[in-house]
Amino acid sequence: MKTIFVFLTTGFEEIEALGTIDVLRRAELDVKSVSLTDSKQVMSSRKVIVTADLMFDQVDFSTAGMLVLPGGTPKFNEHENMKKEVLAFANKGEKVAAICASPMVLGGLGLLKGKNATCYPGFEKYLEGANLQTDKAVVIDGNITTGRGPGLTIDFALSLVEQVAGKEKRDAVAAGLLVE
Protein backbone atom coordinates (compact mmCIF):
# COMPACT_ATOMS: atom_id res chain seq x y z
CA MET A 1 0.00 0.00 0.00
CA LYS A 2 1.31 3.45 -0.89
CA THR A 3 1.67 6.16 1.73
CA ILE A 4 -0.63 9.16 2.07
CA PHE A 5 1.40 12.22 3.06
CA VAL A 6 -0.39 15.02 4.94
CA PHE A 7 1.60 18.27 5.05
CA LEU A 8 1.78 20.48 8.14
CA THR A 9 3.05 24.04 8.40
CA THR A 10 2.80 26.81 10.98
CA GLY A 11 -0.85 27.84 11.31
CA PHE A 12 -2.38 24.68 9.86
CA GLU A 13 -6.03 24.00 10.70
CA GLU A 14 -6.13 21.28 13.39
CA ILE A 15 -9.50 19.83 12.46
CA GLU A 16 -8.60 19.51 8.80
CA ALA A 17 -5.17 17.97 9.38
CA LEU A 18 -5.77 15.78 12.42
CA GLY A 19 -9.34 14.87 11.50
CA THR A 20 -8.20 13.73 8.06
CA ILE A 21 -5.26 11.77 9.49
CA ASP A 22 -7.58 10.17 12.05
CA VAL A 23 -10.16 9.07 9.48
CA LEU A 24 -7.50 7.73 7.10
CA ARG A 25 -5.87 5.75 9.92
CA ARG A 26 -9.26 4.37 10.99
CA ALA A 27 -9.41 3.00 7.45
CA GLU A 28 -6.05 1.31 8.17
CA LEU A 29 -4.28 3.32 5.49
CA ASP A 30 -0.60 4.20 5.70
CA VAL A 31 -0.57 7.90 6.60
CA LYS A 32 2.40 10.07 7.52
CA SER A 33 2.33 13.71 8.56
CA VAL A 34 5.11 15.85 7.08
CA SER A 35 6.50 19.05 8.58
CA LEU A 36 7.20 21.88 6.17
CA THR A 37 8.94 23.83 8.94
CA ASP A 38 12.45 23.48 10.39
CA SER A 39 11.16 21.23 13.18
CA LYS A 40 9.02 18.12 13.55
CA GLN A 41 6.98 20.09 16.07
CA VAL A 42 4.52 22.30 14.23
CA MET A 43 2.28 24.96 15.79
CA SER A 44 -1.31 24.91 14.54
CA SER A 45 -3.66 27.85 14.07
CA ARG A 46 -5.03 27.42 17.63
CA LYS A 47 -1.55 27.06 19.17
CA VAL A 48 -1.65 23.26 19.44
CA ILE A 49 1.79 21.77 18.92
CA VAL A 50 1.77 18.62 16.83
CA THR A 51 4.76 16.38 16.21
CA ALA A 52 4.98 15.36 12.57
CA ASP A 53 6.08 11.89 11.55
CA LEU A 54 8.64 13.19 9.05
CA MET A 55 10.49 16.27 7.92
CA PHE A 56 9.91 17.24 4.28
CA ASP A 57 13.43 16.26 3.25
CA GLN A 58 12.88 12.74 4.67
CA VAL A 59 9.94 11.97 2.37
CA ASP A 60 10.40 9.44 -0.41
CA PHE A 61 7.75 10.67 -2.84
CA SER A 62 8.13 7.52 -4.95
CA THR A 63 6.21 5.74 -2.16
CA ALA A 64 3.32 8.23 -2.19
CA GLY A 65 -0.22 7.31 -3.08
CA MET A 66 -1.73 10.70 -2.28
CA LEU A 67 -0.63 14.15 -1.14
CA VAL A 68 -2.94 16.10 1.19
CA LEU A 69 -2.87 19.79 2.11
CA PRO A 70 -5.03 20.82 5.05
CA GLY A 71 -5.91 24.50 5.23
CA GLY A 72 -5.86 27.16 7.89
CA THR A 73 -3.10 29.28 6.42
CA PRO A 74 -1.78 30.54 3.09
CA LYS A 75 1.70 29.45 4.34
CA PHE A 76 1.33 26.19 2.41
CA ASN A 77 1.74 28.35 -0.69
CA GLU A 78 5.19 29.50 0.50
CA HIS A 79 6.95 26.11 0.45
CA GLU A 80 8.43 25.97 -3.05
CA ASN A 81 9.79 22.41 -2.80
CA MET A 82 6.42 21.06 -1.66
CA LYS A 83 4.73 22.87 -4.54
CA LYS A 84 7.20 21.31 -7.01
CA GLU A 85 6.41 17.84 -5.63
CA VAL A 86 2.64 18.46 -5.71
CA LEU A 87 2.83 19.70 -9.30
CA ALA A 88 4.95 16.77 -10.49
CA PHE A 89 2.76 14.29 -8.59
CA ALA A 90 -0.50 15.67 -9.97
CA ASN A 91 0.88 15.91 -13.49
CA LYS A 92 1.58 12.16 -13.35
CA GLY A 93 -2.13 11.63 -12.64
CA GLU A 94 -1.59 10.83 -8.97
CA LYS A 95 -4.09 11.91 -6.32
CA VAL A 96 -3.78 15.32 -4.67
CA ALA A 97 -6.25 16.72 -2.13
CA ALA A 98 -6.57 20.17 -0.55
CA ILE A 99 -9.15 21.67 1.79
CA CYS A 100 -10.09 25.17 3.00
CA ALA A 101 -7.45 27.74 1.95
CA SER A 102 -5.09 25.18 0.42
CA PRO A 103 -6.83 24.76 -2.94
CA MET A 104 -5.14 28.13 -3.59
CA VAL A 105 -1.87 26.20 -3.91
CA LEU A 106 -3.38 23.97 -6.59
CA GLY A 107 -4.89 26.98 -8.35
CA GLY A 108 -1.55 28.80 -8.37
CA LEU A 109 0.11 25.75 -9.87
CA GLY A 110 -2.44 25.65 -12.70
CA LEU A 111 -3.82 22.30 -11.56
CA LEU A 112 -7.42 23.53 -11.35
CA LYS A 113 -7.74 24.96 -14.88
CA GLY A 114 -10.95 23.59 -16.34
CA LYS A 115 -11.62 21.48 -13.24
CA ASN A 116 -14.45 21.64 -10.73
CA ALA A 117 -13.24 22.75 -7.30
CA THR A 118 -14.28 24.26 -3.99
CA CYS A 119 -12.54 26.14 -1.18
CA TYR A 120 -13.10 28.22 1.94
CA PRO A 121 -15.19 31.36 1.22
CA GLY A 122 -12.94 34.24 0.20
CA PHE A 123 -10.29 32.07 -1.46
CA GLU A 124 -12.17 31.59 -4.73
CA LYS A 125 -10.02 34.21 -6.51
CA TYR A 126 -6.97 31.97 -6.07
CA LEU A 127 -8.51 28.97 -7.82
CA GLU A 128 -7.26 30.10 -11.23
CA GLY A 129 -9.29 28.68 -14.08
CA ALA A 130 -11.47 26.47 -11.86
CA ASN A 131 -15.18 25.86 -12.29
CA LEU A 132 -16.20 26.91 -8.79
CA GLN A 133 -18.54 24.58 -6.90
CA THR A 134 -18.70 26.60 -3.67
CA ASP A 135 -21.98 25.06 -2.56
CA LYS A 136 -20.39 21.59 -2.25
CA ALA A 137 -18.52 20.17 0.75
CA VAL A 138 -16.16 18.10 -1.39
CA VAL A 139 -15.44 18.18 -5.10
CA ILE A 140 -13.58 15.39 -6.89
CA ASP A 141 -12.46 16.05 -10.44
CA GLY A 142 -10.14 13.42 -11.83
CA ASN A 143 -7.12 13.10 -9.56
CA ILE A 144 -7.84 16.37 -7.68
CA THR A 145 -10.02 16.56 -4.57
CA THR A 146 -10.92 19.86 -2.92
CA GLY A 147 -12.83 20.48 0.29
CA ARG A 148 -14.61 23.55 1.59
CA GLY A 149 -13.55 23.92 5.23
CA PRO A 150 -13.16 22.72 8.82
CA GLY A 151 -16.74 21.65 9.55
CA LEU A 152 -16.69 19.47 6.44
CA THR A 153 -13.46 17.63 7.24
CA ILE A 154 -15.13 14.27 7.88
CA ASP A 155 -16.83 14.40 4.46
CA PHE A 156 -13.48 15.32 2.90
CA ALA A 157 -11.58 12.55 4.68
CA LEU A 158 -14.21 9.91 3.95
CA SER A 159 -14.06 10.82 0.27
CA LEU A 160 -10.30 10.19 0.38
CA VAL A 161 -10.88 6.82 2.04
CA GLU A 162 -13.33 5.86 -0.70
CA GLN A 163 -10.93 6.91 -3.45
CA VAL A 164 -8.07 4.88 -1.99
CA ALA A 165 -9.79 1.91 -0.33
CA GLY A 166 -13.28 1.72 -1.85
CA LYS A 167 -16.86 2.43 -0.83
CA GLU A 168 -17.14 -0.54 1.52
CA LYS A 169 -14.19 0.69 3.60
CA ARG A 170 -15.57 4.24 3.53
CA ASP A 171 -18.96 3.02 4.75
CA ALA A 172 -17.37 0.96 7.53
CA VAL A 173 -15.34 3.93 8.77
CA ALA A 174 -18.37 6.23 8.50
CA ALA A 175 -20.46 3.78 10.54
CA GLY A 176 -17.81 3.70 13.25
CA LEU A 177 -17.89 7.50 13.35
CA LEU A 178 -21.71 7.49 13.45
CA VAL A 179 -21.81 9.39 10.16
CA GLU A 180 -24.83 8.69 8.02
Image: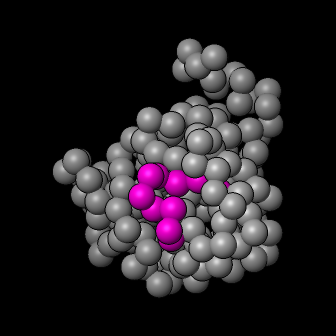
50 on left or right of 168: left
The answer to whether 157 is drawn above or below residue 116 in the figure is above
| Residue that appears at 75% across and 69% down | 114
Q: Position of residue 42 (x, y in %)?
A: 29, 60
The answer to whether 99 is drawn above or below residue 169 in the figure is below
Quarter of image, res 135? top right
Q: Which residues are magenta?
A: 117-126
Q: Position of residue 158 (x, y in %)?
A: 63, 36
| Residue that appears at 47% across and 78% down | 57
Whether residue 92 is visible? yes
Q: Position of residue 139 (x, y in %)?
A: 67, 48
Considering the whole magenta stretch, tell me its main secondary structure: loop
The answer to whether 75 is drawn above or below residue 7 in the figure is below
| Residue that appears at 51% across and 62% down | 124
53 on left or right of 85: left
Quarter of image, res 112? bottom right
Whether residue 32 is visible? no
Quarter of image, res 68? bottom right
| Residue that appears at 60% across and 79% down | 109
Q: Is residue 118 magenta?
A: yes
Q: Position of residue 126 (x, y in %)?
A: 50, 70
For the C terminus, the quadrant is top right
How are the residues colored? one colour
